[in-house]
Image (cartoon, coloured by chain):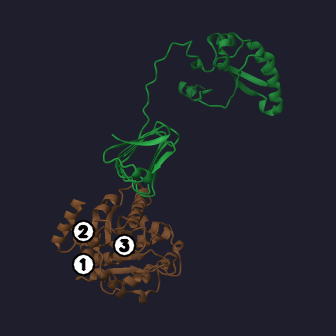
Chain colours: A green, B brown
Amino acid sequence: MTVSGLEVEQKACFQFRANFLPCTVLQITRYDWEALEQQLVSAISNAPPFFTDLPVIIDLDKIKSLGVLNFIKLKEVLLANKMIPVGIRGGSEEQHLSAALVGMPTLTASRLSTAETKPKKKEEPIARLTKLVTTPIRSGMQIYARESDLIVTAAVSQGAEILADGNIHVYGSLRGRVLAGVQGNLQARIYCRTLDAELVSIAGYYLTKEDILNSPLGDGMKQIYLENEQVRIDVL
Amino acid sequence: MTKIIVITSGKGGVGKTTTSASFAVGLASRGFKTAVIDFDIGLRNLDLIMGCERRVVYDFVNVIRNEANLNQALIRDKHIKDLFILPASQTRDKDALTLEGVSTVLDELSKTFDYVVCDSPAGIERGAQLAMYFADSAIVVTNPEVSSVRDSDRMLGLLSSKTKRAEEGREPLTEHLLLTRYSPKRVARGDMLSLSDVNEILAIPLLGVIPESQAVLRASNSGDPVILDKESDAGQAYLDAVGRFLGEKIPHRFIEEKGNWLKRLLNFKEKETV
């Protein structure tokens, strides 16, 4: 019986598959062997089944300035408590080397601190997509631009509400409620051509229509912003 | 292709049923086979305006619940042979309407009718939402006063989001504004919002302006839709509006005070000096 090459290929013995498994990270914040061991034992005694055969990655980010550590000891402590150290992450190059010697690979090479790597080119800043609305926003409608600015090129009716985490620009007539910086961004501003709003608010500080009418500003493009916890309206 | 028109407003008492009746008569008298449905379950009125209240046997809810078939419930209009009325139930409430039921009735009507006019109840609840859900066109009836305008604005918001066309991402329905009970005299006195005020807020194409008129009340009481009163200003205004709806170019009337150009001029001067 002969076996053709094709058939051999079909009967592969393995395949590589990308997979993500949950893994516990043990972040060491202070390098003190005795205390570490004690605290570890007491933490485990609270819920032994949870820690049994638990794969653990040791995070050295907080103690990377300490130089070479006793990884043999650390490994022993973890194994004695039935945990399985699978590797380290963070830390300095020195630490990576000594960990590798005791069979603990560095799992995320990219976590090297920037001081030890060549300064990378800064990533191109990504402009957040501004939410754009071109149809009239009618009474009873609510538009929220989450984590972005909002531009409205149509009218905002009385009884409508527009909100944004960033700035708001309205090019139609503005008669509804308009709230910028709703997550607390004090720098957020509102720009509009005609200001006839029921309420304007920046980061929770607001003016009602009555307040606006009491200080008439005349025609023109308006800018609304926060200054000393006061909402101010200027004509541009 | 059957066209489903919803007559809606949000606010009550602005002239939805009057408009539904006149529009249905106007379309049918031009030879289109037309059905007009009263969606105001529990507050039936269309039958009165159409003058067929004594011939109601079965109603919309009976058809939805399969207690009667559609042909048994449709009432033929006394004036026009191509016009049929599907009356509302007076003894139920709006929860008797179901989406499937309304859909079935409209599908059935679409087999033979050219136009189906849906007379929406006031409010934004179930009855109103079902009346607009399947519409291809909406006529938004508005009075020239602030609360009516705001309610119409709310309605336009719902029309752009809560209809089958909107949900399926199809071409949006066509919106028309019908301004009713308009009195140029009261506009001039400043007691009423002007056409341009309303237009600025709602910003949808104007189908017509129906003047405030005694003829409307007279027509309601007699059970003959006002569009049949061809001598009256309101009747003529509805005829114009139907013509415009069908794509004819008809200039707008009844939007300025009659005659009296001298008074207008004086008014204008007064405004200038103020």
User: Dot 2 lies on which element?
Assistant: helix
Chain on which label 1 sits: B
Q: Which residue is mark 3?
A: B117
Q: Is residue B45 above or below residue A64?
A: below
Location of the N terminus of chain B (image quadrant): bottom left
Q: Position of residue A9 (x, y in %)?
A: 56, 26
Q: Residue at x 49, y 37 (%)?
A: A228
The answer to whether residue A222 is seen in the rendering is yes
Q: Which mark is residue A123?
A: none
Nearer the observer, B265 or A54: B265
Alpha-carbon distance for marks 2 and 1? 16 Å
Nearer the observer, B158 or A44: B158
Q: Are marks 2 and 1 on the same chain?
A: yes
User: Dot 3 lies on which element?
Assistant: strand
Q: Are marks 3 and 1 on the same chain?
A: yes
Alpha-carbon distance for marks 2 and 3? 16 Å
Q: Quadrant of residue B259?
A: bottom left
Q: Position of residue A196 (x, y in %)?
A: 38, 52
Q: Is residue A8 above or below residue A224?
A: above
Amino acid type, residue under disc 2 in the picture: Arg
Q: Are marks 2 and 1 in contact (CB under 8 Å)?
A: no
Of label 3 and label 1, which has the lower sequence position?
A: 3
Q: Residue at x 51, y 72 (%)?
A: B97
User: Dot 1 lies on which element?
Assistant: helix
Alpha-carbon distance for marks 3 and 1? 23 Å
Chain on which label 3 sits: B
Q: Is residue B140 above or below residue B25?
A: above
Q: Which residue is mark 2?
A: B244
Q: Nearer the viewer, mark 3 or mark 1?
A: 1
Q: Which mark is residue B233?
A: 1
